[in-house]
Amino acid sequence: MPEGDATYKAAAALRTALVGKAISRFESPGLIGPTPQIGSAIERVESHGKQLEIIFDDGIVLHTYLRLRGKWHLYHVGQKWKKRRHLARAIIETDEWVAVAFNTPIVETYRQYHQSRHPHSGRVGPDIASAEADMHECAARLFHYDKPHVTVAEAMLDPRVMTGIGNVYRCEALWSCGVHPWAHVGDVPQSTCLDLVLTAAGHVRANQHSPVRITAPDVPGGLAVYGRNGQKCSRCGDIIRVTTLANTERNVYWCPGCQVGSEPYPERDDSDPIARAMDPHPAATQFVGDVLRNRTAS
């Protein structure tokens, strides 16, 4: 599962091996867009979150979006590949190196100078892995998110808000800031949005050159909540949970004991006389729900 730092490292390796080199072979089954020509030289390799782009000297940009399982591998010519060939979505070969994109769901090209640029990516947010990224812009995009009832956990992984964060740092930043992952993004204060962005950026940048991700050095394994479901929270002692985020493949690891910031409370139903007579506290609301269900069943 590539995070922003993993994509950053892949881009750095590809940059070292390929920039300035002419390509001797290019293959991409089902490629959308123009095909780079043999002999074209690679000018730049850039990463933006989980998106990695290779720019050729003829103005063609190869755009790959790695998402959950996509990876770029780099091999010496003649070296045995670690994955099967049918999983390759793009192959770039020079005299010395072979770069292969495996399991990449989006592989497409466009011409850099075209007015519409890339038609599918939209307005991508700043890459928090970069020291030049505007953190206040990321926070503003999160605070003014166009769907205020979406959970903050979902909004944080929207590339229109920011790129480079990934699921590990999403979970760790929410825990560090004490924010409930199911909080509606429209209910999260602006100052908290900035804290989330700054925390996530700090985690990503601190781990760019580290083989092991560490966000909580005092916790065994180096992570505060990610992958620690069923274990005690190092901050409050409650039990860490894991929940699959609706409509995604992502698991969210979180602590119900101390991640209470902007916690979404269930709405009261004042149409029922029992509900109107009860204390509005969430525990009372849950009790009322049990009463109503039992009454209906009987």
Image (tube, rainbow, N blue to C red):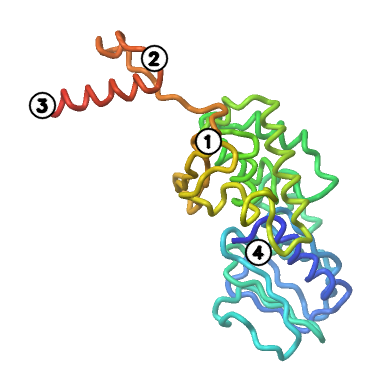
x and y percentages locating residue 286 in the rendered image: 33, 25
Q: Nearer the viewer, mark 4 or mark 2?
A: 2
Task: Determine whether label 1 and label 2 are within 8 Å by CB.
Answer: no
Secondary structure beneath label 2? loop
Left or right, residue 275 beside residue 189 = left
Task: Determine whether label 2 and label 3 are within 8 Å by CB.
Answer: no
Quarter of the rendering occupied by the C terminus: top left
Secondary structure beneath label 4? strand
Residue named by callout 4? 108
- Looking at marks 1 and 2 on the same chain, the residue that comes earlier in the sequence is marked by 1
Cα separation, mark 1 vs mark 4, equals 30 Å
Residue named by callout 1? 151
**Which dot marks residue 298?**
3
Residue named by callout 2? 280
Residue 293: image quadrant is: top left
Left or right, residue 204 beside residue 87 = right
**Which dot marks residue 222?**
none
Task: Determine whether label 4 and label 2 are within 8 Å by CB.
Answer: no
**Residue name at image x 58 percent, y 80 percent:** 83
**Residue name at image x 81 percent, y 56 percent:** 113
- Looking at marks 4 and 2 on the same chain, the residue that comes earlier in the sequence is marked by 4
Task: Determine whether label 3 and label 4 are within 8 Å by CB.
Answer: no
Q: Amino acid at mark 1?
A: Thr
Cα separation, mark 3 vs mark 1, equals 36 Å
Q: How many marks?
A: 4
Closest to the observer, 247 or 278 = 278
Q: Nearer the viewer, mark 3 or mark 1?
A: 3
Q: Amino acid at mark 3?
A: Ser
Cα separation, mark 2 vs mark 3, equals 25 Å
